[in-house]
Amino acid sequence: MSRPDLILRGGTVIDGSGGARFAADVAIAGDRIAAVGDLGGMAAASEVDCSGLVVAPGFIDVHTHDDRYLLEEPLVPAKASQGVTTVVVGNCGSSLAPYTRADLPKQASAMLDDPRWRFPTAGQYFEALDAGRPAINAAVLVGHRSLRFNCMDDLERPATGDEIRLMRGQLREALDAGAIGISTGLFYPGAQQATKEEVADLASEMRADDGIYTAHIRDEGDRLLESIEEAAEIGRMAGVQVILSHHKAAGRTNFGKTAQSLPLIEKLRKSQRIGFDVYPYIASSTALLPGIVDRAERVHITWCKGRPEFANRDLDEVARELGGLTRADTARAVIPAGAIYFTMDEADVTRVVAHPHSMIGSDGVPWDSFPHPRLWGTFPRVLGRYARDQGLMSLEQAVHKMTGLPAAEFGFKDRGAVREGAFADLVLFDAGMVADRATFEEPKQPAAGIARVLVNGETVWQDGASTGARPGRALRRQTGTTRGA
Ligand code: ZN
Ligand code: CU
């Protein structure tokens, strides 16, 4: 073997498979792992002493809204700082591409509000990723809501046959350009009137491509179980794999419901490909939506276009300031805005995080002025708070949820593993120290305990700072291969 570029010496390898850790050196040549084992006889151009550190595959953030963040801030510090080396963008029905409208409907996510960062075709978005060279890798979903904005003059009804044909055409372009699937957000205005037949018809475009359908389901509260059934049925009708996004039970009256939803998913898994992800917090975050403010224990404003002084304030406090309005009326008075909603029970969150089939997805919102701490804290929080401190699972299982499992579900070939021949996407962390530091009060805090992060063999994060390297790649869907799940 030719001389490797780098040897990570004396670390403890957790290889992403879920198997037990072992002591090994890891050699890297170019963008790949060249060898794993006792490499005492091998020399490299440079070496890193990894004693006391875990060497794991870089984390895969399967649920993100980093579409624009990758281009605007190509060092992607919120993610690189956590050890995330790959993100899946375009979730919850919202993607920057394809976007063919000149205007922006009021139902659109704030992610789309800058016309410089909207792309008529997915091909152009991929070109922008290639040219922008972000620090980390990205795979791309097409948002069903974005397709609806492009192809429908009235969003408050199901799509017609002609409109579905138009949407399928745009989805086809995106799949051919390398998109890995479609996402929906049937919960959101602009998509609520979409029927399961509409989504299934659209998603069936991907059958031969082995595309993925990710679902922010219609209702994560009172109709949680029915909404899971609906997403699963869409998957069966379309003949495609389903990923349920940010699995949770929302609202006090639904606390404990994940004790029913998880067995339901397990039952479904016996007859179809269906997986799910979770973020490790009891609060959710999205736009400030008047219709849902009352089901939260507490609502925290994350940004506010018309009244920036309301950002980082409690909605009830603002309501009092505005003369004692109701929460819903206050929301109506200050939107467009973003919010954090305290709507979950810790027992549900830990139940989902601990489930052997859950993947980890941050669902962070990078354009918020005071983002939900999940944007900077998700992965270290699972490793520190939930695996180490609470003993919810072994560190090996926690790493598997963020690496080997998502790589298999999403078909990222040669990623999510520490083994010879795999891409050198790696994170070196201190298992005793790793912890999230981002809080609701101070959300933009890099994690503790992440020593070094490599993407495609290059170090992108080291000792608390970006290195400036931008070796990330767009992970285009591989044609002609069948993904394993
Ligand atoms: Zn969502
Ligand atoms: Cu989301």
Image: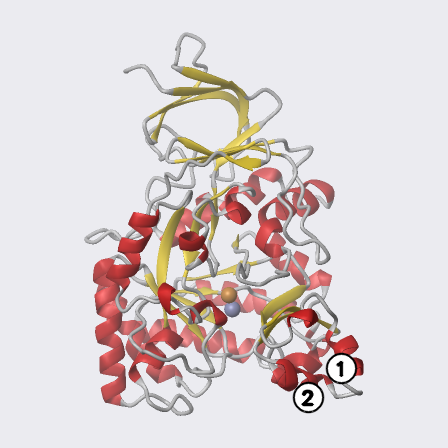
Please state the horizontal and vertical placement of residue 419, each as a whole percent of the image.
Answer: 39, 30
Q: Which residue is mark 2?
A: 329
Measure the C-alpha gap from mark 1 to mark 2.
8 Å
Amino acid marked by disc 1: Ala
> Residue 319, which numbered label?
1
- Front residue (pair 238, 339): 339
Protein image colouring: secondary structure
Q: Residue 121's quadrant in the figure?
A: bottom left
Note whether residue 185 is visible. yes
Along the horizontal axis of the image, is 117 left or right of 289?
A: left
Q: Quadrant location of the N terminus? A: top left
Q: Residues within 10 Å of mark 1 (few under 14, many from 20)?
A: some
Please state the horizontal and vertical placement of residue 481, each as a whole percent of the image.
Answer: 23, 51
Which residue does the image show at 24% across and 75% down from the upper left?
168
Along the horizontal axis of the image, is 144 left or right of 292?
A: left
Q: Residue 271's quadrant in the figure?
A: bottom left
Up-down: is 305 above or below 367?
A: below
Kindly state the secondary structure of the residue where label 2 is placed. Answer: helix
Please state the horizontal and vertical placement of residue 81, each as a whole percent of the image.
Answer: 55, 42
